[in-house]
Image (tube, helix red, strand yellow):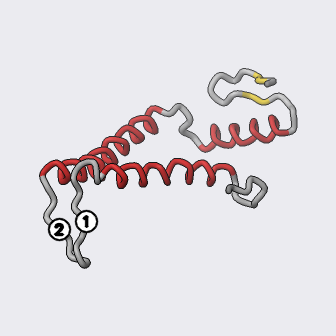
Amino acid sequence: MIDLHDDVPPSSRIIKFVAIPSQAIPLALLSVFGFREPVLGVPQQQGPLTLKFIKFVFFVLPCLFSLLSFVIKMRFPLRTTQQMLRVREGIALHMRGEAGVDPLTNKVLTD
């Protein structure tokens, strides 16, 4: 059971909720694709479908998601240190219930 009152920040908890299934699901699916478990600690020859699944899930997908995240990061509008500082200021103001300024549009945000 998860203790929501511990000292772990919510962002770390979210990372764990994403990381655990992203590792467990492919490993669970290996048997569906014919994975042969080691016998007495000796790895067994794997079939072509199993090898394709392993290559796709553990190499191709991570590469594609890495490239996608790179493209998203390069198109992200906040680029300067000044903009990032203004975001931090806005968050601090918001936490106090005060209005802040959007660093991209320079509009005053009250909510």
Q: In this view, does 101 lie to the left or right of 96?
A: left
The crowd level at tag 2 (other Cα within 10 Å; few <14, some 14-19, many 20+) is few
Residue in the foreground of this view, choosing between 6 and 99: 6
Q: In this view, does 49 lie above or below 100?
A: below
**SS assignment at label 1:** loop
**Between marks 1 and 2, how big is the CA–CA gap?**
7 Å
Label of residue 22 in the image:
none
Which quarter of the rendered picture does the N terminus lie within?
bottom right
Residue in the foreground of this view, choosing between 46 and 93: 46
Residue labelled with disc 1: 37
Residue in the foreground of this view, choosing between 107 and 43: 43
Residue in the foreground of this view, choosing between 98 and 85: 98
Q: Residue 88, percent across and down? A: 71, 42
Residue labelled with disc 2: 44
Mark 1 or mark 2: which comes first in sequence?
A: 1
Q: Residue 2, percent across and down? A: 68, 55
Mark 1 touches mark 2? (CB < 8 Å): yes
